[in-house]
């Protein structure tokens, strides 16, 4: 990962999360807290965004990705949406502090963007097993209806991609080990969709998950998630996938 953003899990006060020493984002406890996936997506996006690209931050949560890209002059307009009202309000608050150039919508997946065309969609809609969701702290308030193998929204977006709803567009999205990665790869191959993996990061499962060994083992044996053990620590991965319909 490029060392451009350090995730400092420190708060100036309880409402602000610092992503690097020049950028912080307003959060409250109802909003998904930016994490490693956020950083990998930002890193990947800044490498592939072209001048004047119209970029959509889908599943924007606090608006962190769009705001970061805008603040760093990588995009000129912030488009974002989320299914959660709290997230949309928070994204609007964060965007307003930076610019008047924003359009943030309440939207289930791409539903509110039917008349818009984007050059790049950054899809960060919840993509981990819903069972993992129920035993982790990550989605305490943020919705996650992505099914027990975590692939529902990713596959839906891939279907849209395949059906050319994304004419001349590119797509990046994270694939976590805490979802059925093989099912996503199988879908891509079956539908002859070319893809690249732009980055991959291994990370240790947090303690609140590791204590549910029984559930983890069962989900792994059902191939709904994947993780591996190294030095008695359980690790999983996040990869950033890239599709190009241009
Ligand atoms: C993993 S969080 C990512 C938030 C943000 N991009 C970040 O990096 O902090 C996933 C977001 O997807 C949203 N979400 C879940 N289901 C959705 C859906 N069907 N349509 C749109 N957004 C959805 C959640 O509310 C949550 O804010």
Image (cartoon, grey):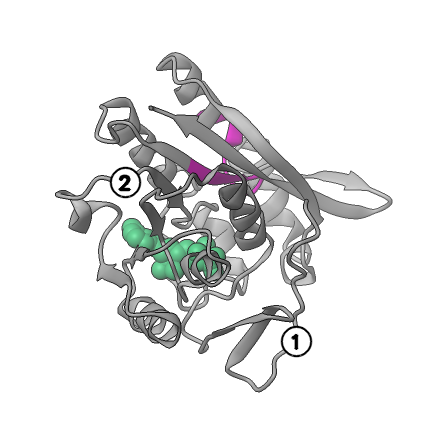
Q: Residue furthest left?
A: 115
Measured in 3D between alpha carbons, the distance from the residue under mark 2 to the one under mark 1, in whole angstroms, is 34 Å
Give me the disc on residue 10.
1
Residue 2 in view: yes
Q: Is residue 8 above or below residue 15?
A: above
For label 2, the crowd category at 10 Å Cα-Cα, with few meaning under 14, some 14 to 19 and many 20 or more, is: some
- Look at 44% across and 42% down and name the residue there: 150
For label 1, the crowd category at 10 Å Cα-Cα, with few meaning under 14, some 14 to 19 and many 20 or more, is: few
**Would residue 219 be found to the left or right of residue 142 on screen?**
right
Q: Is residue 14 above or below residue 196?
A: below
- Look at 34% across and 41% down and name the residue there: 153
The residue wearing badge 2 is: 118
Could you say which quadrant of the image residue 238 lies in? top right
Stretch of the chain drawn in magenta: 172-183
Which quadrant of the picture is home to ligand 1? bottom left
x, y (%) of residue 103? 24, 60
Q: Could you tell which of marks 2 and 1 lies nearer the N-terminus?
A: 1
Task: Confirm whether the magenta stretch covers residue 24.
Answer: no
Give me the disc on residue 200.
none
Q: Is residue 85 above or below residue 114?
A: below
- Look at 68% across and 52% down and name the residue there: 205
Task: Confirm whether the magenta stretch covers residue 174.
Answer: yes
Q: For the C terminus, which image quadrant?
A: top left
């Amino acid at each position: 990962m490029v060392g451009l953003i350090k995730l400092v899990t420190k708060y100036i006060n309880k409402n602000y999360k610092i992503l690097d020493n020049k950028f912080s984002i307003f959060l409250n406890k109802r909003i998904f807290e930016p994490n490693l996936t956020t950083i990998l997506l930002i890193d990947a996006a800044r490498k592939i965004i072209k001048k004047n690209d119209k970029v959509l931050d889908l599943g924007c949560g606090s608006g962190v990705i769009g705001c970061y890209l805008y603040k760093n002059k990588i995009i000129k307009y912030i488009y974002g949406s989320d299914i959660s009202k709290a997230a949309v309000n928070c994204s609007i608050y964060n965007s307003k502090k930076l610019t008047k150039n924003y359009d943030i919508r309440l939207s289930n997946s791409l539903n509110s963007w039917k008349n818009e065309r984007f050059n790049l969609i950054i899809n960060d809609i919840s993509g981990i097993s819903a069972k993992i969701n129920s035993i982790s702290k990550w989605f305490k308030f943020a919705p996650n209806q992505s099914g027990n193998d975590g692939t529902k929204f990713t596959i839906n977006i891939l279907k849209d991609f395949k059906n050319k709803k994304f004419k001349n567009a590119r797509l990046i999205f994270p694939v976590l080990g805490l979802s059925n990665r093989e099912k996503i790869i199988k879908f891509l191959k079956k539908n002859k969709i070319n893809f690249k993996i732009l980055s991959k990061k291994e990370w240790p499962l947090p303690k609140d998950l590791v204590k549910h060994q029984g559930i983890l083992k069962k989900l792994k044996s059902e191939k709904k998630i994947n993780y591996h053990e190294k030095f008695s620590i359980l690790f999983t991965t996040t990869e950033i996938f890239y599709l190009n319909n241009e």
